[in-house]
Image (tube, rainbow, N blue to C red):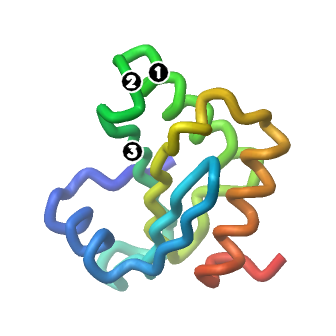
Amino acid sequence: MHTLKNATEIDGIFKEGMRSAGNAVTLIARRTPEARGHDGRVLFVAGKRLGGAVVRNRSKRVLREAMRRTGGPWAGWDVVLMARPATPSASPAELDRALRSSLRRVGVTKE
């Protein structure tokens, strides 16, 4: 799995990416720049307002697993998955539904 690490690219996604917010996850997506190739990249974000380190780390683990179950990383797309307060306690099925719905809304998938 390729992750986003470059601060300039991350800022660009936050400024120019398409957003979809749900109860359990917020998604921001933008096409991967041609210079980077066709591989999809992912960034997991859990802000301090969610709670302590244990809660933030659990939120990112849960998002990582939901991403894997829904077929990510998605070729040709840079995707940011942001944890919401409901993320750590959401069921896997609920997270998968929310993620698939967000991916459809921004055009990453068509299913």
- Residues at discs 1 and 2 in contact (Cβ within 8 Å): yes
Q: Residue at x 79, y 37 (%)?
A: 92
Q: Which mark is residue 51?
A: 2
Is the residue marked by circle 1 packed among few (<14), some (14-19), or many (20+) residues within 10 Å?
A: some
Which three-letter amino acid code belongs to the residue tagged 2? Gly
* 87 or 71: nearer the viewer: 87
Question: Please, what secondary structure does the residue beneath circle 3 have?
Answer: strand
**Reading the chain from its start, which is encountered first: label 3 or label 1?**
3
Question: Please, what secondary structure does the residue beneath circle 1 have?
Answer: helix
User: Where is residue 98, by image quadrant?
Assistant: bottom right
Q: In this view, does 93 lie to the left or right of 44?
A: right
Q: Identify residue for label 1.
A: 55
Q: Which residue is drawn at 30% across and 32% down?
A: 48
Q: Identify residue for label 3.
A: 45
Spot occupied by residue 100 in the image (x, y as percentages of width and height): 74, 63
C-alpha distance separating marks 1 and 2: 6 Å
Q: Is residue 67 left or right of residue 8?
A: right
Is the residue marked by circle 3 packed among few (<14), some (14-19), or many (20+) residues within 10 Å?
A: some
Q: Is residue 31 left or right of residue 111?
A: left
